[in-house]
Image: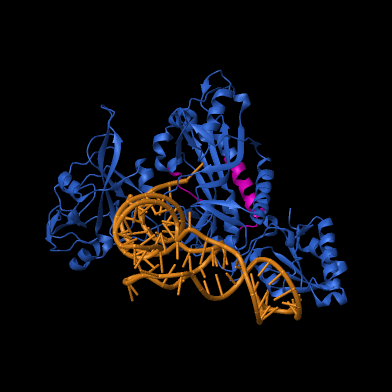
Chain colours: A blue, B orange
Amino acid sequence: MHRWSRLFIPTLREAPADAEVASHKFLVRAGYIRQLAAGIYSYLFLGNRSFNKIVAIVREEMDGIGQEFLLPALHPREIWEASGRWALMGGNLFRLKDRKGADLALGMTEEEVMTEIARKELRSYKQLPQIWYQIAPKFRDELRPKSGLLRVRQFMMKDAYSFDIDAAGLDLSYKKHYETYCRIFDRCGLKYMVVEADSGAMGGKESHEFMVRTPAGEDQIVSCGGCNYAANLEKATSRLAAVEDLAAEGDGKPLEVHTPGQKTIEDVAKFLGVSPRNKIKTLALMTEEKDAQSGKMKLRAIVVLMRGDHQLNEAKLNSALGKPTRPMEESEIKALFNSPAGYLGPTGIEWAQHVTKDGPVLLVDKALEGRSNLIAGANKENYHLKNLTPGRDFQPTAYADLRSVTAGEACPNCGAPLGIDTAVEVGHIFKLGYRYSESMGARVLDKNGKEVTPIMGSYGIGIDRILTAAVEQGNDDNGFWLPPAIAPFEIVVTPTNVGEEKVKSAAEEITNRLEAAGFNVLLDDRDERPGVKFKDADLVGIPFRITVGKKVTEDTVEVVQRSTREIRDVTIPAIVDYFQRVLQART
RNA sequence: CGGGGCGUAGCGCAGCCUGGUAGCGCGCCUGCCUUGGGCGCAGGAGGUCCCGAGUUCAAAUCUCGGCGCCCCGACCA
């Protein structure tokens, strides 16, 4: 029997001053977690119980489609070199040296280790498909850990990897994960959305994120109220209303206009009496790439054109270019384009006509494709150009979707207005493709005895974030309530006065019977005043409370549902039946 | 890495400007009392004032250096 008086459940009346988000405040106040260092937390008794329940659900569901491994967290530099990520991951990868001076890394994901096993062991198409997973700590040297358990340096991840002979096989492995993830999050009692996602630094094509809406989240998700379209802002698109182009002025050729001191889009549009929609926003960026001949890194100018009222989406730009960029400095703009920074425009510059060719790259957002008589900087202090038409007055390297969707724009599928919410990512599935199997040299023989590279997928779930998201999803001023499936206890039994023999023994009896029926029950046998015990019961995330008080003389207790505060009298003999009915859905 | 803030008892904070006895609330311990929403009374324990150096007769307080933590931004599977 779990007696509160004997357990370590250090609840706090006040939240630590540095806690900002609800989950952080309450998990600390409720005695679930304690901080060890920035982004590093210990789980105490209640936290660990909840954590273990989540792990059990994930494991049970994953065992339905895959096999569990346990991989080392300490990785030799060599395998990260082999995949190319030693250089790519930058500061986010924890690195250390052993006493001999050899470089090691703490695993942030395990594509390399899993692929290394596949490379050495998989020989034949007959061994495929494989789905291997593990539940293990991951490490990230975050620039800024924050929000309690939401962005941390060490966390527990369920990571899975699939190996298939061909794309059709990968589709199936991916689908299995998609469905399994839905079952996992359903069983954990989370309200979640599945959104199309950008695959970012992972490479690969198709990708979905499992998101829980909360203001504490760090992701923006775009969703449609009219259909099931949902996507991460990094990936989302929308249907734009047609824009009326300006009429050509003069002979229709680019026409210089004097715009003294007008630098911003807003200023220029107002000054010329046009809408920002008829203006071109010119953004100058720099990226680094390897020179084909010398093999040395060199800078490459990237100029991006957006519709005046649109925002550049960095994630989209990154995936269009395949590498990150930084803003160009004023001196660089001057040196490369002989233009003052506020008046840069696309004309009169020899743009590379393909990304593989030398020269500055001109990427133009699709919203400008087919437009005419636009206005942009003239590469000359205090002047802009009218009558600009892409393709006629300048030749873009390429058109691409580079724009961030804004709330209220039309859904690409059905046209209904789109909404934007903040959310926290609890799961992410990727079709990786050949990136790791190729670079690390995994090969199997196919039916025809020919060597082929297996195609991979990778699939993650943040265990800690399931708990955090659940707290974010269910809390009020007094504390939080977890879904029964992941709560440390489903029921807390609160005798109002342990000094009264009848109350005390009834509480014990009820606890015994519920435990015998398989429920997780916490008996608050502390000799405290009722107010203290009620406050604690409200705080610690347990979804049901049984108050044992005066009504024991009538063989009756009160059952309180934490989320709704609904109170119901139940007779003691009926208590087990009652919870079997109410908690029936639990697994 | 840029900007801002903080570091004094387990938690929340005051004291610092203007150098001299380290303080408040909650929590904790003992006793009495009380028992349906963080009771009441009495007594008590608990501090390298983040670390180091300096100035000074004297430093929580002033100066310099370092470390840690939080927030905003940048970054981000």
Q: Is residue A186 magenta?
A: yes
Foreground: A373 or A213? A213
Between residues A227 and A244, which one lies in front from this camera angle? A227
Question: Does the stretch in magenta take in A487?
Answer: no
Residue drawn at the location 49% of the way across and 58% of the way down: A147
Residue A392, horizontal then vertical, whole percent:
20, 47
Q: Position of residue A234 (x, y in %)?
A: 42, 51
Count every numbered label the image shows and give the total.
0
Asked whether residue A194 appears in the rendered view, the answer is no
Give residue A60's position: percent from left, percent from top.
69, 44
Q: Assign the N terminus of chain A to one quadrant of the image.
A: bottom right
Q: Between A55 and A454, which is closer to the camera in this rendering?
A: A55
Q: Please give left or right for residue B20 compared with residue A450 in the image.
A: left
Q: Which residues are magenta?
A: A174-200
Q: Measured from the top left, where is residue A114 in percent x and y?
A: 55, 32
Between A384 and A115, the one lying in front of the other is A115
Q: Is residue A261 left or right of residue A410?
A: left
Q: What is the quadrant of residue A374 in the picture?
A: bottom left
The quarter of the displayed image where residue A411 is located: bottom left
In this picture, is A365 found above or below A481? above
Horizontally, residue A73 falls left or right of residue A310, namely right
Q: Judge whether residue A484 can be spotted in this image.
A: yes
